[in-house]
Image: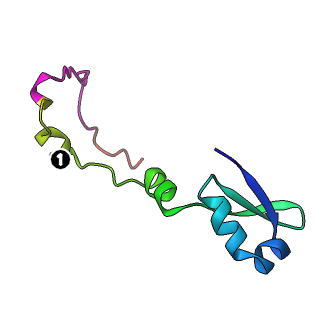
Amino acid sequence: MAITTLSSREFNQDVSRAKRAAKKGPVFVTDRGKPSHVLLSIEEYRKLNGKQKSILEALAMPGAEEVEFDPPRLGGELFRPADFS
């Protein structure tokens, strides 16, 4: 994965270059020498932002019955009355 860094000016002057570079890895855009934005390909973005499964989807997945799951038990009371004193 190649990381490319472009100044805001370079980015504005050659967006096509930034888009080509984003196919190879993230493109950091700087503003006055400090990173301000990151350009990613849509594939990389989807990997990072992938939709997480709901608990229902996870339990319905094939082989879910074979997953060992032994959650810790809660001890004591599940709730306490509020103390307004």
Amino acid marked by disc 1? Glu
Q: Where does the image place residue 67, in percent across and percent down from the top left?
A: 18, 23
Most extreme residue toward the right, as rendered? 32
Q: Check residue 16 for magenta coloring.
A: no
Residue sitting at x 80%, y 64%: 6
Residue sitting at x 37%, y 44%: 83
Q: Check residue 70 for magenta coloring.
A: yes
Looking at the rendered image, the quarter that the N terminus falls into is top right
**Left or right placement of residue 37 versus residue 56 in this view:** right
**Along the line of sight, the residue nearer the viewer: 17 or 38:** 17
Q: Judge whether 62 appears above or below 21 on screen.
A: above
Q: Judge whether 77 appears above or below 82 on screen.
A: above
**Along the line of sight, the residue nearer the viewer: 45 or 76:** 45
Q: Where does the image place residue 81, in percent across and percent down from the top left?
A: 28, 42
Q: Judge whether 31 appears above or below 64 on screen.
A: below
Q: What stretch is highlighted in magenta?
A: 65-79
Residue 18 lies in quadrant: bottom right
**Left or right placement of residue 25 versus residue 82 in this view:** right
SS state under label 1: helix
Q: Judge whether 47 appears above or below 37 on screen.
A: above
Residue sitting at x 67%, y 60%: 21
**Along the line of sight, the residue nearer the viewer: 69 or 75:** 69
Residue sitting at x 77%, y 73%: 11
**Left or right placement of residue 59 versus residue 4 in this view:** left
Most extreme residue toward the bottom, as rendered? 13
Q: Where does the image place residue 70, in percent across and percent down from the top left?
A: 21, 20
Circle 1 packing at 10 Å, graded few (<14), some (14-19), many (20+), is few
Which residue is labeled 1 in the image? Answer: 57
